[in-house]
Structure formats: structure tokens, C-alpha cells
Image: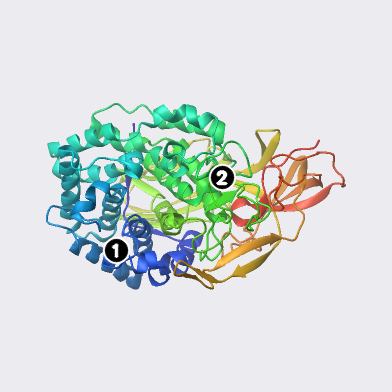
Amino acid sequence: MNSWNFYTSQQLKAEGWLRRQLEIQAKGLSGNLHKIWPDIRDSAWIGGKREGWERVPYWLDGFIPLAYLLDDKQMIADAKRYIDAILAAQEDDGWICPCSKKRRKIYDTWAVQLISKTLKVYYDCSGDERIPDVIYRILKNYYDLLKSGEIRLFGWAKYRWFETFIALNFLYERNNESWMKELAVILRKQGFDYRTAVDSWKRPKHIWLRKTHIVNIAMMLKSEAVSHELLGEEYTDISENLREMLDRYNGTAFEGFTGDEVLSGINPTRGTELCSVVEQMFSYEILYAHTGESKWAQRLEMLAFNALPATLSEDMWTHQYVQMVNQIACERTMIMAPFSTNGPEAHLFGLEPNFGCCTANFNQGWPKLALSVFMHHDDTIINSLLLPSVLNDNGVTIRLESEYPFKNSAHYYIDSDRNFSFQIRIPPFAKNLRINGEADSAELFETKISSGHTEIELEFETVPELVKRPDSMYVLKAGSLLFSLPIGHDKIKREYTKRGVKRVFPYCDYSLIPKTEWNFAFADTDFEITNHDISDYPFSQEKPPVTIKAKMKQIDWGLKFPYRSVCRKTPRMKTPPSEVKEITLCPYGCARLRMTEMPLIK
């Protein structure tokens, strides 16, 4: 098994459209939460009276790498201000969470696991030498409390026990002390074993349970990869078996899972929580780094280029709690929620629709993706994602110019004062691959780089194709991009205050009301793909970077009873009332209202 190491934000920087995404995020909600949202601005983590559990660590987990990737001095100073306050409050025995000693027994220690992981991110970015000792004291205290029985894992901590290993593995590499392995065993023993939950995934009952909670499951996928070495166990790739089971019974077109809080079956009108998208991305980043298996990087691309941008507004000032693959409107339902256990506003765009966990947690998606473009092991560097970036690593500079996934080419400019092995992961769908003008069929291109200047040019083709989905439905896919029928809409703004939290422009709530037809079916399997310039907003519905012309027919689709803004799972009738029309489709990630899974009428 060929494992890879991540580079730090000091070594690896985003360029091109990817940097633009980070800049948009920094100017939007992520870069301003500490100014506008009481749960961050006035958190108990920094001496305030608001939430003192997961929201500040969640936010910092994305805000910190975002700040350092952009070299934004003000954001770096803001991150340090929070870290300094958190460190100053650490108690003599190592406990760090804002919870009194007498309440520790009833405090869900998911926050202990999360802040340890977040502090490790801060150390990777800043190199602050205070952090290893702080993490050591946190986890040694955690071990002492768990071993003595003074506390036990319960609630979220029980179902996310493996998250502790992000920091615990870091400590063990530095200190190699026996109690660390003992803590690993305690965590696994008190934690939940998801292998026992598989039967409950097959027929979702739409009852709120942690074992079917979509975010827990997205995190769980990396559990064996992060824990097996400290536990002294063989790696079995159990994640693949569990993922396959989840996909079979709850899979989506973008290769995530339905989960409007809990697993929701095969249905393009069910929701997928934003937290689960970024956590599944992080799990795949870890799995690829741990195994070197291309399948995890490819699945990461599907989430990153489709599900992540689709559920954020273009300016990233608002987001949805859940997105739908077939989403014809985003407006409050007046009868009951169309989801399993979410409320009727969960698919609106806003500051804090449904719950605030995604408001804090979505921040990690783009920064951690940017830090996964290049990885290394010994004297080998691999380009795992063909995204525009610059790497500076110990005398080696690699500049990758690319507009992937919108255009299928990449140009590498390499300057080095040493020899090393360089690898490029080739997407599995690449057709007519050419490297420096020569035809190639490699799934992993490898070459030896000598000191001096080297250039590598790579290009390939992708073929648009209809991929069959359950219930005789199809999705149009070209490479790692899904394509959807975009639905024109009016954007209705709502400003208000709820529980002392203001929702005002640009972070108020928005309903999206459709104003163009959406009830279509594919009428042919011939497609014409066209590339365009990437606009200031890479995932723009008005100016998408790539489009596909498709022949389609309108059909009698119908609405899901009793809703006026949710389409049926499958069409009422497939008899087309219209002649063939040529429709321009855009990437799924560009369309906030869309139809994606549609029938094929031959």
C-alpha cells in the first residue's frame, strides 16, 4: 500500500479558478462569520456566552487553512486570536473545552475530538510550536478521564470516536508513548461499530438515529484508514464495502448519499446535508492519501465539482442545509417538510437554514481540496488532482496551469535543483490521452525529473454519456462533471431576526422560485459540448464554463403530493406533449435549481 503525505499551506498554493474560489469564500460567509454570527463572535470558546461546543472548532477547521492558503494577514491574525484564547483557557490537567469540571461527565466530548483535530490543522499551517504540547495535554487528559471511568463516550463522541485519531496519530509519530495506543483501544471499544448498522441502511425508516445520520456516516468512511495502525490491525478496505452498500440503497448521481439528517433511500428529491458533503470529501482525501488508490480521488472529484458548489450561492454568502438532485424550487413548504427529519426551510439559501452546523462546517471543503492537489512520499511527488496550483518543496517548484475539470488539459512547469520521481494521476475516463504530444494510455503517468527546467503537457478528451440510474432514469455525465437542466428563477430575499441572530443582506434567507419549464426528458444520446471562458464566479449559472446541447422533450412529470414545489420522484407519464427541443445544459454545480435525473425517450 503506497501512502502519501499532505503538503502544508506554506508549500502548496492554489492558482487560477481554484484560488478564485478561495477568494470568494474568504469574502463571503467563511471570512466573516466571526464578525456577524454570535455563535462564533461571542462563543464560550473565547470567553463569551454563546455556543461552546462544535461551532468554533468547525469554523476554524476551514478558516485556518483558507487564511494561510491566501496568505491573508488579517485572517491569519484573526485565527491566532481565537487560538490564543482557546489555549489560554486550557486547565492545568489538560482539559480545554469551555465546560466546568463538575459538568464534564455530561459534556459530549465530540468537542474534545474536534478541537484536537483543529489544533493539528493550525499547527500544520502555522508551525506554532505551542500546539504539540497543548494537544498532548488534551489527549492525555482525555485518556486519564476515560480510563478512570470519570467520563465515557456517549452521544456524538461515541459515533465519531475515530476523529480523535487525526491528532492522536500526529502525537504518536512525535512521542510514541504506550498510553496513546491504550487510548486508541478505549476509543474503539466505547465507540460505535458501523458494521452493525448496515441492515438499517437498506430500508431507511426516516427516524432520527445516529447510526443512520448522514454526517456520522460520511466521517466514518475514513475510520479504518486513520485508526488501524495504532490499533495494530490489518487494513481491510472495509470502507469500500460500506460505501458500496450505502450507494446501493442511498446513492445519488454525484456519488454522495441522500441524508436529510438521516439516510433517505434512492430518491432524487430527497436532501443531502452540506456537512456530509465536506466530511465525505475529507474522508476521501484521507483514504486516497492512505491507500494511493485512484478510486478515492475520483470520488472526491465528483463531490467537489458537483455537490459542493451546487449547495452554495455563487458569492458563498449563503448556503443550503440540504440540496436535492432534482430541485425545482427552494421555498418553504407550508404543509410538512419534504424530507426525513429536517424542517421545511432546510433547502433555502441562507445564513443558518435548519441548523447552524453546516454554517460553521462547510468552510473546510474548498481549502482542504486545494491542499490535496499534490502529495509526496520519500523522493516521489504525485499530482493527484489536475487543479491549478503551485508547489514549492525543498528546491522543487511545480506550477500547474489548468482549467480542469472544465477543460481537459494541464501544463506543468517544473524547476528543480534535485532529482525526483514525478507522478500524475490520470482520470479513469480520459480518452485519447496525449502527453507531450505522444499518445499514452497510462492510468498513472510517471517520469524521472532531473535538476533544471522541465515541462510536461497533458491533454485528453471526455465523452458526454448518459449513465443509468434507478427507476429507469438517466444522468448526463462528462468526466467528473454532471450536467443538469438549469431552471431560471426569481430570488426572493427575506431579512429578519431569530433568537437574537440577524439575517440581513447579504446573509439573509433567499427563496428561489422557478420561472422556466423543468419537466423534460432526454430524447437522444447525441450531445454537443462547448467550452467557455471561466467567469469571476467559476460555478455561475448565468455564465457556466462549459455547456452541453441536448435534444429533449417536455413530458407530463407532475408534482409530489401534497407539495407545490417538489417534483415527483419519477414522471407521471412519459408521453411527450412536445416536439424535440434543443436545450443547453450546464454543470450540476452551476445550477441552483435543476433537473438532473431524467428519463430517456427513444
According to the picture, the residue beneath numbered tag 1 turns out to be: 44
Q: x, y (%) of residue 359?
A: 45, 59
Q: Is residue 445 left or right of residue 556?
A: left
Q: Residues within 10 Å of mark 1 (few under 14, many from 20)?
A: some
Does residue 556 appear to the left or right of 435 in the view shown? right
Tell which circle, 1 or 2, labels the residue nearer the N-terminal end. Answer: 1
- Residue at label 2? 480
Residue in front for this viewpoint, 279 or 457: 279
Q: Nearer the viewer, residue 578 or 49?
A: 49
Q: Please give the label number shown on residue 73.
A: none
| Residue name at image x 82 percent, y 50 percent | 581
Residue 425: where, in percent of width, then height? 45, 41
Residue mark closest to the camera, 1 vs 2: 1
Side (left or right) of 132 relative to 513? left
36 to 454, vertically: above or below: below
Image quarter of residue 221:
top left
Q: Which image quadrant is residue 149 in?
A: top left
Three-letter amino acid code at the position of disc 1: Ala
Report whether 11 appears left or right of 230: right
Q: Residue at x 71, y 43 (%)?
A: 568
Please tell me whether mark 1 sits on a helix, a strand or a loop: helix
